[in-house]
């Protein structure tokens, strides 16, 4: 009996091992240089075990074969290709893009109708549709009309700084206040008053969305490494409900009172109103606007705080940048979209920080 049990366990162990390692020679057969994967985890063991950031791991992978145009790796059992060659990147992103528009990061629309409709996680035709909605919002004409909205936020920010000159400000929090108000105004057409009210509802919702928790970390890991079993809502229910009500109230108010505004929500309203049947559902409108919220709030505030940090360290750069800006504008009212493009040193500072 014991022999039979050991034999069964040994057989099952061999089958499991063969199943886990079945694809480990995939890149070898393809003639692509690759990194040897570990059992169970592939090449992303430290990411899965939360020992390191996914960006750090991919950076190490990228530089592991500096002479190669691409590096083969494994996400668990799934082969993945990390592209290094600029020519290959152009081929994937431009020439043969129709074959490469799927997304490794996946959220089911039925599980999370808000994030599930975002172009960051949609695939195939759904991605094309959502991208076609967002791209026109970033044209020069659309950005130009949003500049006055941003300038209003800048005035609130200046007033806030002047009232707190004798205090130490938390840089990350301060930049988050700015991007929250800009996104609220340019996307939703509302004044969130983050600089005037630290407990403003919009500000609290933005903090809640990006607050790292065990639950959200687990949801991210599952959607990345095991999307078929990831049945987790990323956006908290109270946050999604807040934005649903915000969209509903703003939508109804504008239609009832004939109010129009130069923001992203207005573009979606216009598309729905000029057709007999609405083009976008309520969930889609919330998802599309929240995509700008995700993209504009956290990423932009992080970039700004890094720039401010570098300027604080490098007084020579700070002085030169200030001189360029002061020579171009007497005050905030003089600032326009086109004139911002005539500041080469500002562009260099921002581009350098991006890198």
Image: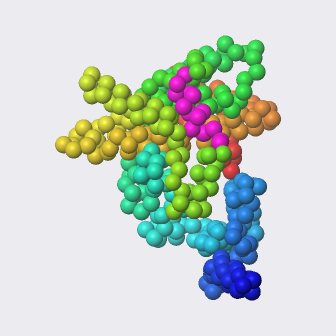
The verdict on residue 201 being magenta is yes
Prevailing secondary structure of the magenta residues: helix
Q: In this view, does 349 lie above or below 218?
A: above
Q: Quadrant of the N terminus?
A: bottom right
Q: Taking 264 as reference, is 224 left or right?
A: right
Q: Taking 313 as reference, is 260 left or right?
A: left
- Can residue 138 be seen in the rendering of this structure? no
Numbered marks: total = 0
- Can residue 99 be seen in the rendering of this structure? yes
Q: Is residue 48 above or below residue 256?
A: below
Residue nearer the viewer, 194 or 166: 194
Q: Where is residue 202 in the image (x, y as percent from the top left)?
A: 52, 28
Q: Taking 168 as reference, is 99 left or right?
A: left
Region rendered in magenta: 200-213
Which residue appears at 27% of the width and 28% of the height?
255
| Quadrant position of residue 311 | top right
Q: Where is residue 86 in the image (x, y as percent from the top left)?
A: 61, 67
Q: Where is residue 16 in the image (x, y as percent from the top left)?
A: 66, 78
Which residue appears at 56% of the width and 28% of the height?
203
Residue nearer the viewer, 54 or 4: 4
Q: Where is residue 53 in the image (x, y as percent from the top left)?
A: 72, 53
Q: Is residue 235 above or below residue 107?
A: above
Which residue appears at 58% of the width and 17% of the height?
196
* Figure colour scheme: rainbow
């Amino acid at each position: 009996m014991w022999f039979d049990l050991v034999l069964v366990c040994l057989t099952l162990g061999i089958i499991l091992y063969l199943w886990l390692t079945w694809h480990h020679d995939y890149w070898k057969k393809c003639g692509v240089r690759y990194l040897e994967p570990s059992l169970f985890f592939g090449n992303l063991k430290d990411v899965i075990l939360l020992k390191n950031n996914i960006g750090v791991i991919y950076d190490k992978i990228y530089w592991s074969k500096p002479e190669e145009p691409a590096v083969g790796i494994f996400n668990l059992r799934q082969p993945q290709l990390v592209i290094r060659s600029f020519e290959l990147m152009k081929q994937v992103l431009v020439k043969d893009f129709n074959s490469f528009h799927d997304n490794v990061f996946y959220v089911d629309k039925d599980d999370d109708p808000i994030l599930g409709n975002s172009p960051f996680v949609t695939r195939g035709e759904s991605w094309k549709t959502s991208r076609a909605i967002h791209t026109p919002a970033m044209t020069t004409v659309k950005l130009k009309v949003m500049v006055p909205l941003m300038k209003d936020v800048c005035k609130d920010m200046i007033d806030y700084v002047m009232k707190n000159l004798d205090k130490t400000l938390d840089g990350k929090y301060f930049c988050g206040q700015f991007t929250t108000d800009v996104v609220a105004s340019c996307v939703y057409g509302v004044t969130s008053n983050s600089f005037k009210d630290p407990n403003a509802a919009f500000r609290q919702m933005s903090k809640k969305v990006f607050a790292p928790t065990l639950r959200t970390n687990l949801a991210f890991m599952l959607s990345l490494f095991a999307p078929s079993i990831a049945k987790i809502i990323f956006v908290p229910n109270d946050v999604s409900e807040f934005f649903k009500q915000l969209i509903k109230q703003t939508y109804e108010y504008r239609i009832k009172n004939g109010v129009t505004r130069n923001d992203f929500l207005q573009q979606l309203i216009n598309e729905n109103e000029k057709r007999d049947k609405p083009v976008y559902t309520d969930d889609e409108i919330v998802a599309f606007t929240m995509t700008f919220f995700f993209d504009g709030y956290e990423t932009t505030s992080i970039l700004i705080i890094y720039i401010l940090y570098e300027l604080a360290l490098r007084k020579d750069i700070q002085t030169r940048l200030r001189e360029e800006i002061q020579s171009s504008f007497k005050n905030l009212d003089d600032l326009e979209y086109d004139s911002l493009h005539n500041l080469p040193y500002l562009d260099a500072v921002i581009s350098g920080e991006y890198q």
